[in-house]
Image: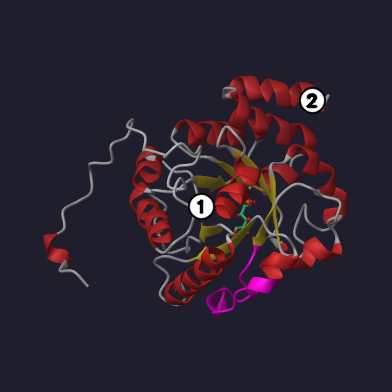
Amino acid sequence: MPDMDNFKEASAFGVGTPQETAGFPLKGCGNLDWGMKNRLSRIFGADGKSLMLACDHGFIMGPTGGVERIDLSIVPLLEYADCLMCTRGILRSVIPPTNTVPVCLRSDAGTSILTNLNDNVVIAAEEAIRVNAAAMAVMVAIGDELTEAKTVANLYHTVDIGQKYGIPVMGVTAVGKQMTRDAKYFRLATRMCAENGANIVKTYYTEGFETVTAACPVPIVIAGGKKVPEREALEIAYKAINDGAAGVDMGRNVFQSEHPAAMIQAVSAVIHKGLKPDEAYQMFQDLAK
Ligand code: R5P
């Protein structure tokens, strides 16, 4: 461990000076192998942006609002998503195998008792390959005394699998209730995920987000978080993209909307067409009629 006394506060983030991408649309991924790049391209496309539809909430929370029946609420939205984030249980039991939307597979195990979350159990390599995962997602609880070490170990192990078989890994930053959700925390959490080998990092939008994306050498996608009014969710997505995010991995703000198909299309337009919040909200309202 270096002597922490000599470290100075970070400030030279170079916001506005993009990281060199070595000719690949996603930063930090230009030197990866063909299979990795191909899977990342399936998720992010030519513009390097992605709308991931998250419906993995049931793996620790059960059938909460919007994911009671994934066949009814999520499957009809797949045509608008660039990627589906779900568990292997839902994939096999509900998602039609004719689906061609790439899957970011929830690859760690969870319990409903949060202190025992992710007790060093991650998916077998063969299983991720068997279900044709385009990426593997594992949760990392930076700053949480009980679970940080276990979850960092999970990430590290999953990255070993991913590197061996060419499957990108997404580190999902879990924010404990006792932690301050500010840019400094998210810079720490996202950077630790990247340095431990994550190819994509999922985190939350916050003020100063441009420093979070600048200091993370791999693409960041934001989680949508708790349900807020549609206009607000669209604004968060817009700000995140504007501040350097490569996409959103949104769940509740899509599937808990009164008009999920309209909402997912409006979010997609923010990400891929650069619609401003008011324009996207107008689109949402038009589609919801
Ligand atoms: C992350 O670990 C969760 O399981 C969800 O995938 C994530 O929070 C995204 O969903 P939401 O937009 O509902 O926050």
Q: Is mark 2 within 8 Å of ligand 1?
A: no
Q: Residue 287: which disc? A: 2
Q: Residue furthest front?
A: 34
Q: Quadrant of the N terminus?
A: bottom left
Secondary structure at badge 2 equals helix
Q: Residue 86: which disc? A: none
- The answer to if 114 sits in the magenta stretch is yes
Whether residue 259 appears in this view of the structure is no
**Residue at 48 percent of width and 52 percent of height:** 32
Q: How far from the left and from the top, in percent, is residue 265?
A: 72, 32
Secondary structure at badge 1 equals strand
Q: Nearer the viewer, residue 163 or 246?
A: 163
What amino acid does circle 1 point to?
Ile
**Residue at 16 percent of width and 53 percent of height:** 8
Q: Quadrant of the C terminus?
A: top right
Q: Quadrant of residue 94?
A: bottom right
Q: How far from the left and from the top, in percent, is residue 277?
A: 58, 25
Q: Residue 200: which disc? A: 1
The residue range painted magenta reads: 106-126
Q: Main secondary structure of the magenta part?
A: loop
In the rendered view, tell whether residue 99 sits above or below residue 266: below
Question: For mark 1, does the 10 Å Cα neighbourhood hold few (<14), some (14 to 19), or many (20 or more) residues?
Answer: many
